[in-house]
Structures are given as C-alpha cells and as structure tokens.
Amino acid sequence: MHELSIVADLFTIIEEQSRQVGAKRVTKVRVLIGELSGVVPELFRTAFHSYKKGTIADKARLEIKVTRVKFKCHGCGKEIKTGDISSPDFSYACPFCGSREVELISGRDLYLEKLEIET
Amino acid sequence: MEKSKKEVLVLEDILGSNKKIASSIRKKLEDKGILAANLLSSPGSGKTTLLEKIGLKLKDRYRVGVIEGDIETERDAERIRKIGLPAWQITTHGACHLEAKMLARIFDQIPADLNFLFIENVGNLVCPASFDLGESLRFVLLSVPEGDDKPRKYPEAFITSQVFVITKADLLPYLPFDADRVTAEALEINPKLEVFRTSAITGEGIEPLCQYLEKKLQELRTKNA
C-alpha cells in the first residue's frame, strides 16, 4: 500500500500548480497510471479521496486512465502495444519476429495529466 | 457571478520529486566511486543473510556499508555491525518501502570512501519497485520456499532490476521449485538480468556474485577515470 505516499506527492504538485494558475478550487484531477507502475488504481482512488480532505481539491473528482504496456522490439524495430498483462497469453516476446530483446517504452508511468479548476 | 471553470494541462511525473532526489544521490555516490545496490524481496527471503555472506567476502579488500530498511527495529543493522561493517538503520514506521528522501536524510553519515553500499529495502516484492533510491544496481531476490511462479506475478520488481538472485538453493532437492523454469521466466520478462543461484548454508554462488560486484565496481572506476 504505497499508493498513499504517491498520492501525497500528487497533492504537492496539485497545490503548486493551483498556486501558479491562481486556482480557487480544483474540481477534477486526471491521472495516468501505467499498468506496470506498481500502483493499483482502486487503492489509489481510496488514498486520493481520504487525502483530499481539507486541501484545495477537497471536492475534486478523480479520473484515472490506465495506460497499457508498450514495448519496442530490438529485433525488428516494431513498437508493440500489448494486451492485458494479467491474461495468460500475455507475452514479453515480440509477436512479429519472436525476439525477446524487447524494451519497455511505456506502462511504468505515473502522471498528473490535467486539472479542472475554478478561478 | 458564475464561477469560471477551466482545464489546465499539467503532464507532470507524480514520482518526479523522488526521481530528482534519487538522481542527485546516484550522481554523488558514483562520483565518489561508490557502487550502490538496492535489494528487493519478500520478507524472509534472505536479504540480510546474503548481505552478511557478501560482506564477509568483500570486507578484507573493500570498504562496505549497509543501509537497512525496516518498518521497525534496529535488528538487521545490528546483525550487519556484528560482522564488522558499518550499518545505518532506516525505520519507516509503517511505510512499506524506502524512498529517496529517507536516504537523503542520512546521506551525510555515509563515509565518502566506501566502495560498496548495499541498501536493503523493506521486505516487500511490490511497493519498493516503484521508488528509485539512486542505486546503480537493483537486485531482486527470490527464495526457493516462496515458489517458482513469482516473476510474472510481480513483474515490476523483475523489470526494474539488473540482478536476480535465487536464494536458499540448498533447499532445491526438497521442494518443488524448478530453478530453470523460474530463470527462464525472469529472463522472458527482462532478458538483461544477471542470474545467480546462491545458498548461505553451503556458500554456493556467493563467490560468483562477489566477482560480479567487483566487475561492476571496476566499470564504475573506469567510467570515473
């Protein structure tokens, strides 16, 4: 349950952004959570709503977009968008050339994408 | 007056502050020629025991220090001090992982003339994987009693590591753990992993692991020269 410490860092960014743009209140927060980021969206949501109390985002809704894992194959150079990582046929090898020399290019990311604010 | 709502595009890495502190720690350590390794595994898979074995092998020729991360108690640091190595305990009081800022707080206590700094993370195969501590190498350990199905179940720990150590290999004859299968699965997730099979009881694999660490230290020195 490291989601709470990540949410604490998220709020540091939210507070700072709000100051910069002169927001009176944050009404919506949209985050991108990579499938391989190690963060569980549901736990993140729980942590968010318990942390937001008393902050500028007190009443904010949280939108989570889960970003899928993407690889680049060093065998054939293709980019590979994968299916669900929990599925039994999920493979870490390139489906085009079979190479195992694939490099993760997205799916570990954790981003605050945008805020909806009232000024 | 109607309140005006607007959208602000931010696109900021939520772990950016941790990554920034970690990068600064890595630079300081590497500039001093200190090779730092962050050890990840479940509780009880033998991180401290492995560090005792490695520490005893390396300490005659190198200066070795250990940072111990635990939720409570100084027990692990005491074990490391008992074999004559300096150890610093970080107790997280509930947090399931170490973060770069926790290291930054004790950084001044780390002697500048160390060669190896081992950081034993809080026992947990999930959460520590998300936090860069400024290490040069990340180890993931898996002990034989834990079962051979773990790499795909805990992919982040394996994807972010450079070294995979199977511990308690002396138990292989007694348990249904297929070391070749687990190695193949780990390499499928991360083909660049260096794999070692070790036993603290028989001493198997400790020497090759130390040789690997010495090679990595040498590479760091060459880079700094």
Image (cartoon, helix red, strand yellow):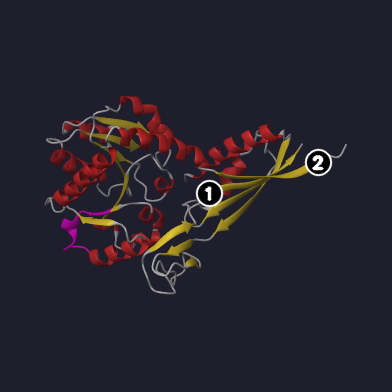
The x and y percentages for residue B47 are 26, 45
Residue B4's tag is 2
Q: Chain of mark 1?
A: A
**Res A78 visible:** yes
Local packing at callout 1 (Cα closer than 10 Å; few below 14, some 14-19, many 20+) is many
Quadrant (top left, top right, bottom left, bottom right) of the C terminus of chain B: top left
Say what amino acid the circle numbered 2 marks: Ser
**Quarter that holds the N terminus of chain B:** top right
In x, y percent, where is residue A31?
A: 60, 49
Numbered tag placed on residue A110 in the rendering:
1
> The residue tagged with tag 2: helix, strand or loop?
loop
Question: Residue B59 occupies which quadrant of the picture?
Answer: top left
The residue drawn where x is 28% and y is 63% is B182
Residue in the image at 28% along x and 38% along y: B224
Which segment did they paint magenta? B164-176
Q: Chain of mark 2?
A: B
Three-letter residue code for mark 1: Leu
Q: Is residue A10 left or right of residue A73?
A: right
Residue B115's x, y, as percent?
23, 35
- Magenta stretch encompasses residue B148: no
